[in-house]
Image (spheres, rainbow, N blue to C red):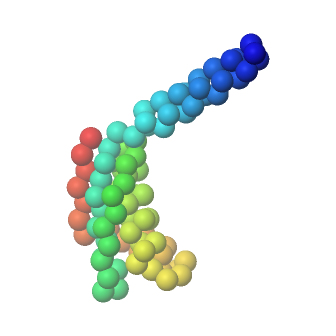
């Protein structure tokens, strides 16, 4: 019985630590909109910094708008046409 309780306590502690580490890192929410070859897509992202959130937003939006790695890489180098971030 004691080993079961210790196992449950260990799993609960690990889950709490994992949740705390995950939520602690997210501090900026952004909406990033990209236009590419006649299409437009906006992505909602969260990250630790505004720069990281903008990069993730562009990557996400370009993934929807492009068809192929070459197009995706080219799209990711373009600046978003709109971005709004809030801590």
Q: Is residue 33 above or below residue 20?
A: below
The residue shown at (35%, 39%) is 27
Residue 18 can be seen in this image: yes
Tally the numbered discs.
0
Position in image of residue 19 (x %, y %)? 50, 34
Q: Viewer-proximal residue, 82 or 16?
A: 16
The residue shown at (68%, 18%) is 5
Instruction: Tell me the quarter of the picture where residue 44 sits.
Output: bottom left
Q: Viewer-proximal residue, 84 or 6?
A: 6
The residue shown at (49%, 83%) is 67
Residue 77 can be seen in this image: no
* Residue sitting farthest toward the bottom: 38
* Residue sitting farthest toward the top: 2
Q: Is residue 6 left or right of residue 37?
A: right
Q: Is residue 43 above or below residue 1?
A: below
Instruction: Tell me the quarter of the picture where residue 8 sits.
Output: top right
Q: Is residue 74 left or right of residue 13?
A: left
The residue shown at (64%, 28%) is 11
Q: Is residue 7 left or right of residue 26?
A: right
Q: Is residue 76 left or right of residue 18?
A: left
Position in image of residue 18 (x %, y %)? 55, 33
Q: Viewer-proximal residue, 22 or 58?
A: 22
Quarter the N terminus occupies: top right
Quarter the C terminus occupies: top left
Q: Viewer-proximal residue, 1 or 13?
A: 1
């Amino acid at each position: 019985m004691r080993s079961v309780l210790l196992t449950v306590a260990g799993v609960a502690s690990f889950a709490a630590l994992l949740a705390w580490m995950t939520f602690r890192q997210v501090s900026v929410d952004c909406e990033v909109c990209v236009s590419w070859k006649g299409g437009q897509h906006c992505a909602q992202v969260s990250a630790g910094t505004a720069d990281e959130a903008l990069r993730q937003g562009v990557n996400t939006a370009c993934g929807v708008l492009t068809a192929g790695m070459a197009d995706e890489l080219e799209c990711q180098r373009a600046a978003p046409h709109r971005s709004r971030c809030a801590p």
